[in-house]
Structure formats: structure tokens, C-alpha cells
Image (cartoon, coloured by chain):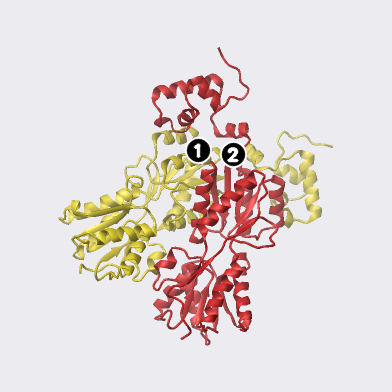
Chain colours: A yellow, B red
Amino acid sequence: MRRTISTPTLSDVAEVAGVSTATVSRCLNAPDRVQEATRRRVMAAVQQLGYSPNFGARVLAEGRTRTVGAIIPTMENAIFSRGIQAFQEELRDHGLTLLIASSSYRPEIEEEQIRALVGRGAEGLLLIGFQRSAGIRDFLRAQNVPALVAWAYEADAPQVCVGFDNQAAMAALAQEVIARGHRRLALISADPAVNDRAAARIRGLRAAMTAAGLDPETLALEPTDASLDAGGLAFRRLWEKTQRPTVVLCGTDVLAAGALTMAHEMGVDVPRAVSITGFADLDLARITRPPLTTMHLPHRRMGREAARMLVRMMAGDPVESLKLDCEMVLRGTLAGPP
Amino acid sequence: MRRTISTPTLSDVAEVAGVSTATVSRCLNAPDRVQEATRRRVMAAVQQLGYSPNFGARVLAEGRTRTVGAIIPTMENAIFSRGIQAFQEELRDHGLTLLIASSSYRPEIEEEQIRALVGRGAEGLLLIGFQRSAGIRDFLRAQNVPALVAWAYEADAPQVCVGFDNQAAMAALAQEVIARGHRRLALISADPAVNDRAAARIRGLRAAMTAAGLDPETLALEPTDASLDAGGLAFRRLWEKTQRPTVVLCGTDVLAAGALTMAHEMGVDVPRAVSITGFADLDLARITRPPLTTMHLPHRRMGREAARMLVRMMAGDPVESLKLDCEMVLRGTLAGPP
């Protein structure tokens, strides 16, 4: 007798084949791990019922894709990779698959990728920082796809966010630097025009200078690309100025490692001739000589918290923004002025 | 007069609105960058023609998603990030969007992600290394989705691949090490059971020992995780052996940087007390002190070539595997035995 079922389910297949639903699932997803006789019985039931194991049909049936998207500015900076890896691991514990895109720090590419991920069924998005057009925010609202901003925290942000107070963290680091007696400060930073985390760090540094009675206009600011080599070239430009800085703060550990490597190559002793500080406490902060004084950002914890928050947002639950604490790590690249 | 078109295209909308197709596209994708009057005219044409700008409809109309998937073992290792970034940039020049997943070096997660990416419309896949089940290879064949194996090259591989000859590259490095007089060799390596690139490097090292008249059984092999800390702990285990190695080769720069950092912490002078070598020539190979002797792998070039090959495979053109040359980079961590 042929049963008639409008939308046959996995359970229907299991019942007809006389096996568990887990076995049916295994037959469909890992047939080489199922005994041949079982596989044949299940496949016969699939055919008899007209069950469609294909993903699209499953999505239609369940109305869910169980897919989350994340868009990061670049694959090449470890400042994103550790947190994203933790984000993915936590999502997986909730049965969700993560698809990642990388925007090369270009807002128009990020917009394309947001549309592509939503078009491909992403039910929630992780985005870095707050900078994006009103048009794409409207698009996300219209599509009813929750988006969590990560790697940045602002108390009065209109969107839910999880991250660090970049401004306060850089201010704390600058305060320590100034307390060591430094008065001629330089900062190697990503371009604040396309990176709101960089902009917040610059504000924090200037605020600390003002609070300490220094003129924030005396800050030697070197905006540059995010790469190791760019950090090195920026350091050389600073060192060629007539008024050399006594400390070079850097917006990321990558820039700081680049600056330190260039200092070595130029024969400039760190920290005796100049101090250098990083920001993030990535692995590479520990492998330079001397190791970097930097601000530790809890990237793994942020990734895990971000996943939990986004899961709640996707379930329609109310979620509040979360600020994570940073911790100063004093290592060998910071000393008093020469 | 209402035109009747069975499947209205972007060009139809442009014609009716009296604007270029680029302007129509901008209205749909970045409306805030178009003048309001233009936007209204285009939107009226969209409504009149019944043109559907939504992604799903576009996919149905064109029969294409213009999406490529890549699955890498981890986000956290720079050995993948640089090549994937270049892969994405080249794909973008071909009008393709890349979605990335990370499998945590677990074959069963990679299988899930392959199915998810194909289910989400990926028209081609980039996969790392050759190790995966017959079931998932059958699945890809049945779905008619071309998959390119990257980061690995084997002359007799049944699948199209692009990468380095890991075996030959490690053999060349080992040859140099042995020529410097080293006889007690150790290797810190990823687990060859789940990483066929690591397995190939081990074979290359043993082959070089045999060719030089050394017993490959004397190689002190320390399999470990891929992290910096794991490299350090493996170095410490090697250093605690009664018969210490005079050189510690490492399967990646990350492991080598970890070993070098641990050596510093233990007060072991590199290269006077022991030599250390890396593999890949990532940025971090230049920031350690001394900088790492390593094997340069052209990751950016591989990413670009992989994109071009996959585009041809997706077009149904015949594609041959491509081997890229590696280059030894001699820096400060390699000297003769103490």
C-alpha cells in the first residue's frame, strides 16, 4: 500500500524503513558509514514516499536554514580570526553553520556581502563596527535579519553590540605611557575614516593627553594600512622627523610588530631609544623581542558571547549590548623616555 | 502601454526608466547613493515590469548564484588567511562572491560544511588537502559542483589541485640542515593522521635523511596541535630528552615561533645551542629574533591561481593541476651544530 503524505518527513522515512531517524539522517549525509542493506532499505523508503533530502527542500519544510553569516574586514589580520573561530565554535554548539565573508575594509563590498548572505539564507549576521549606510540598515530591518555589531562597544549605540570600549582602553594605555614621563607621543593607526575602532582609539589617546595637561595637537599621527610592512614604514617616517617621538603607540599589535622590526633593522634600541606599544595582545605580541606592552582584548570570550547573543536575537528575545573589559599587559617594549 | 515580458531583465528596467543598467543596479543595491528623482523613475519601471530584484529570483532567472565556497581547517592560522584573501580578491574580479567556512581540522565538520555550502548555492568549492571520504566526493560529483584542492600538490592526484610539493620542499630544507653538519634532527609537526600536508613534510624529511646516509628512525618526531603554545611545549619536551637534538625543524612558522619563544624563556640560545627552522614564511617569520630560516610558500600567488582555475572549472573548461615553486629563506635561526 502506498501511503499518501503531503510533505513526507524524516520520521516518515524512518517508520517505513523500520530504522531510527538518526540512521535515515546518516544514510543521507554519510552513506559510507551505513551498512549497504540498511542504506538500500532507507533509500527505497525515500523513493516510495517522495521524500526530498535536498537542503533547499529541508529549508522550505522547516522554514529555517540554520545558517549565520559574519563579515570581517580582512582574513589577514589575527585581530579578527581568533574571535571568529570562537564565534563559530559556540554557534556549532547551537547547531548553526557559520559562513564568513571578508570585505577588504570596503563598505560597498560589505553591502554586497550582506545582501548575498541574506539572499543565501543567513538568519543572523555578525558585523564589525558601526560604520555602514542607512540603506543597508534599512535592508536588514526590512528582511527582518538580526545583526549584531561586534569588536566595538558604545554605550549609546542604537544597535546591539558586543566588544571593547576602544576609546577607554587606549586612554588607559596612554595614561600609563604618560605616567612613565613621556611627553612626545606618536600614534601609528589604521585610517580612522574607514575604521571606527581606530577613530575611537585616537579619541582615547587625545583625551588622555588633555587630562594630563598635554596638548593633543602635538600627537604625531601616522595613519596607514593594517599590515606589518605598513607599520614599519610608518615608524621610519616618524623617526625621520626632526622632533622624534619618545614613544610610538600603535593601534594594533601587527602595526607595533612592524614598527619594532623596522626599529631593529634601523639599529634603534627598543625600549632604550624609543618605547613601542601594541593593542590587542595577539600571539605575535609574545614572539617579538622584547615582547610587546599591549592592551589585552578578550577575543575568544567576545566570540563566544557574540554567538550566544545572536542566537537569542534570532529567537526574538531581547538582548542588551555587552561591554567586555580589557587588561593592560606590561612587557619589555615600554620604558621611560631616553 | 504596458509591455509584456515573460522574465523582465535589468536591461528592460533600464530601457523603460531611460537610465543605464548601472544606475538601475545602484538603485536596487545602494539607493542612498542615487538621486531621489532617478530612484523614483527606476522603481516605477521595476513595478511596471514586475521585475524582481530579490536575490532568490535573480538566481532562478539566471540559474546562477555567482557564489563560491571555501573550507579551511582554521581561521586562526595565517598559513591559510593570506592565500584565501588573495583567492577572494581574484574571484571578485570575476564577479564572484566567496563564502568561507572553517572546519576545526575535523573531517565530519568539513562534510557538513560542504553540504551546507552546496545547499546554499555554491557553484564551486575550494578545499584544503586531499583527505576526505568517498561519500563526500560522490556527493560533489552527483551535485556537479567542481571542487579544487589547494595548499597541496601531488603529481598523481586524481583531483585537480594547486599548491606546493610539501614533501620536496621539506626535503630541500632538510638537505640544507644536514649539509650544515646536523645529525640529531627533531621535527615538531601537526598530526599527520588528520593533515596530509604534514604527512608529506614528514616523508620529505625522512627521505632527505635516508639520502644523506642517516637513519630516518632517529628522527625525534613531536606531533602536536597547530598553535604557538603547542610549538613551545613540544620544544620543551624535546629539550628534556637525554639525547637533545641539534636542530628542531618545524612543520609551520607558527610552531617554529612557539619553539623559539620557549627557547628564549628557557635561556636556550638560538642558533648557538640549537637551530630552529620554520615552514611557510609568514609575516611572523620576520618578527622573531633572530628571524626564522624557513621555506617560502607563495600563498598570494596560489590564491590567485586557485581562483582562476576554479573559474575555468565552473565554466566546464579542462584544467590541469598546478605546482608552485617554493624558495628557501635563510635567516638567523639556522647555524651549524654546537
Determine whether the residue tagged by mark 2 lies in a helix, strand or loop: loop
User: Which is in the foreground here, disc 2 or disc 1?
Assistant: 2
The residue closer to the viewer here, B276 or B173, is B173
Q: Is residue B265 something one can see in this rendering?
A: yes
User: What's the mark number on residue B65?
Assistant: 2
Determine whether the residue tagged by mark 1 lies in a helix, strand or loop: helix
Residue A55 location (% of width, % of height): 65, 43
Residue B271 location (% of width, % of height): 43, 79
Of the residues shown, which amino acid type is indicated by label 1? Arg
Q: From what the image shows, is residue A299 above or below residue A293?
A: above
The residue closer to the viewer here, B175 or B245, is B175
Q: Residue tagged by mark 1? A: A115
Q: Is residue B77 something one can see in this rendering?
A: no
Residue B80 location (% of width, % of height): 52, 58
Residue B303 sits in quarter:
bottom right
Q: Is B335 left, or right, of A296 in this rendering?
A: right
Q: How much space separates mark 2 and mark 1, taking CA atoms?
A: 12 Å
Give me the chain letter of mark 1. A
Furthest residue to the bottom?
Answer: B242
